[in-house]
Amino acid sequence: MDSIVLHFIVIMSGSGILSVILGIFAFANRHRYIGCQLFMFMSFATAIYIFGHTFELLGRTPEEIMFWICFQYIGLPFIAPFSLMIVLQFTGFHQFLTKRHMLLILLIPFLTTIMVFTNSLHSLFYRSITTNSVDGFLLADFTIGYWYIIHGVYAFGCSMLAIFILLWFLRVTKKEYLKQIMILLLGMFLPILTSFIYLLGATPFHIDPVPVVMFLTNALYLWAIMSFQLFKLSPIAMERVFEHMSEGVLILDRYRTLIDYNPAAAAIIPDLSKKGIGHKIDDIFSALRKDHAFIQWLRSPQDHTQYDLMWEKEQPFYYHLTASSLFNRRGEVEGRQIVISDVTKQRLLQKELEQRAYMDGLTNIFNRSSFIERTHIVLKEDANDTAILLFDIDFFKQINDTHGHHIGDEALRHIVSVCQQHLGNEDLFGRYGGEEFAICLPHCHFQEACHMAERIRHSFEENLLHVDGKKVRVTASFGIAHTAYGPDSLETLLFEADQALYMSKRQGRNRIYASTGGNYMLYGENHSPPASR
């Protein structure tokens, strides 16, 4: 029997089989290639639609026809939205494909399926369904309802948006991906065109020809998979990722010539716009960095090497560079990739944490443990000519009680500031306790250490603390110990200095006592003690 309807059924059956094959292939590769999972959903939705329409044409009663119409709408409404999501993923807009956005995209298709299954209750999808006998087949004719129009407009909008995205991307992407994009464009444009022809009533017996056209689009997809691996479209997405990476990326050929870089690299190395593609990488960096070790690293052929670089611009910037080889299909080194990560924030935070570990937070000088650690090192280098000074702020508790703890904190910072005016770069200065401080003077004779203590004590006495409109006189009592008088360990020196400090306090404060081998002598004039606060 030479029937047009039968020809439609045969071609549709082949189209449905191709859709199943594509769906199985996509399922098998869903973890290997980007977009395979969505392509699998689209293929199975297409297969449901095509087989449903095929069995609709084979239906012998209106009830059978309505059953297969409902069946095909389990898949049909989802084809265009899945196509849109595939395009979004392949073109690098995958960040929009959150679970929430995907559910929103699929909301209208879900409602469409529900509307078709419940059409007998509201007639919003089909107002009426009639049947006609053609060449021995019972064909359905429909009067469409309001939701059919909503469904059609939504499906058309998804398909057109996908096409516009592909056309836009075709202009900005590389020519190597032309075949893949053209296949996707044909796979979406041909069904839309056929749907218009169907809606205009220009098809034989008003049969929906879209499943027939899908035989062609499915064959194109299958050919593309076998010929040039359609699903390996990840480079399209990777190209967008390359452009929008926060790390700078430099691509070199085997001769260390720069052949590509991304905007992040240009932001890090402004000279790339002047001396970039086509120039040797070591020439580019040699104009910026004269570090011989760094240039040697750039020229090194070793794979997966790293380099930490500090670059002085308006302020210090820290970068972590990673170099790795690029290989061709034969496994040969084709070039080199250098990834530049800005680690300035991390390094500054690391320095801050390190500083907190050995610096006193209030006064920004060494804390007790750090002072002791560094003084041990000094004593190993100069065990015969090192002085230890301990001093304690006089009546510090009364300063806090009378003026408040914030004035007490200012007094501590004031003492440190005045003291630092007299100390050299080699001298160690630390906060030993609450209001007690320690100084290590390397390469310093006993008499020089006493003079230093007197200058500092006198500066405390002369420099009043001005804060909140108040003038506060802050003095200190000192104790000195020196290696010249026999102490052979830091613990002994600190003990002797502490005993001398105790003597200064006992004898009236605001004075200096020095340990001389178990004896304690007053240094300088017999100063009047500070007034009790």
Image (cartoon, rainbow, N blue to C red):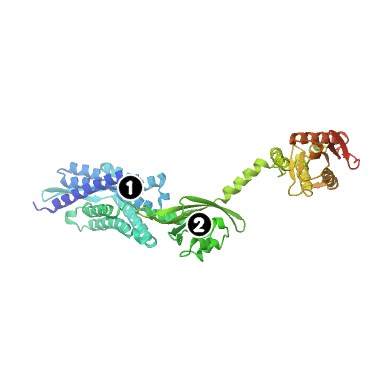
Residue under label 1: 36
Q: Is residue 196 visible?
A: yes
Q: Quadrant of residue 503?
A: top right
Q: Quadrant of residue 395?
A: top right
Chain-order first, disc 1 or disc 2: 1
Q: Position of residue 6 (x, y in %)?
A: 13, 50
Disc 1: CA contacts within 10 A as few (<14), some (14-19) or many (>=20): many
Q: In this rendering, would 253 be left or right of 353?
A: left
Q: Position of residue 482 (x, y in %)?
A: 80, 39
Residue under label 2: 298
Above or below 13: residue 495:
above
Q: Position of residue 506 (x, y in %)?
A: 86, 33
Q: Residue type at mark 1?
A: Cys
Q: Mark 1 and mark 2: span between their CA atoms?
A: 39 Å
Q: In this rendering, would 245 be left or right of 197?
A: right
Q: Position of residue 195 (x, y in %)?
A: 25, 55
Single out the mark in the foreground, 1 or 2: 2
Tell which of 141 and 30 is nearer to you. 30
Under tag 2, what secondary structure?
A: helix
